[in-house]
Image (cartoon, rainbow, N blue to C red):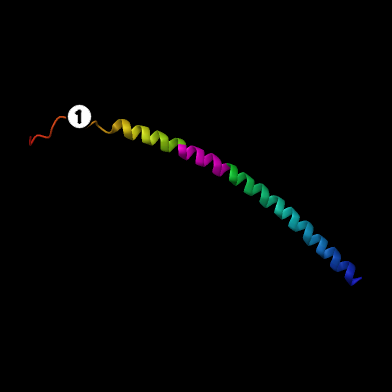
Amino acid sequence: MELEQRITEVETRLAFQETTLQELNAVLTDQQQQLGSLQDLLKKLHGQLAEVMSRNQPNAAQEPPPPHY
């Protein structure tokens, strides 16, 4: 009977581990999708920031010379 108990315990642990692995895989998949979305958003924001920075930098040819000239 001891062998049957051990086999049952091993099967129970295996089933628990399979369930845990499925749950972890689901969480990891969700986090990967979130990470991809955040990376896309970061690229978009970086592009917008670069555009705003380029529009706000004055052109040296259009600026009047400093007063000491």
Q: Is residue 41 left or right of residue 61?
A: right
Quarter that holds the C terminus: top left
Residue lying at 78% horizontally and 61% vertically, measured from the top left: 13
Q: Position of residue 49 (x, y in %)?
A: 38, 36
Query: Label 1 belongs to which residue?
Result: 61
Q: Pinpoint residue 9: horizontal percent, then vertical percent.
A: 82, 65
Q: Is residue 44 left or right of residue 19?
A: left
Most extreme residue toward the top, as rendered? 62
- Amino acid, disc 1: Ala
Res 63 → quadrant: top left
Image height of 26 relative to 58, above or below = below
Quarter of the picture holding the N terminus? bottom right
> What residue occupies the far bottom of the structure in this picture?
2
Residue 12 placed where, x, y %? 81, 60
Q: How many marks?
A: 1
- Magenta: predominant secondary structure element? helix
Is 67 displayed left or right of 26 in the figure?
left
Span colored in magenta: 34-43
Magenta stretch holds residue 35: yes
**Residue at 78% of width from left, 59% of height from top?**
14
14 up-or-down from 26: above or below? below
Q: Residue at x 46, y 40 (%)?
A: 42
Q: Nearer the viewer, residue 65 or 15?
A: 65
What residue occupies the far left of the structure in this picture? 68
Q: In the visual, does 20 lie left or right of 51?
A: right
Q: State yes or no: residue 42 in magenta.
A: yes
Q: Residue at x 81, y 64 (%)?
A: 10
Q: Is residue 3 above or below residue 19?
A: below
- Establish if 21 lies above or below 1: above
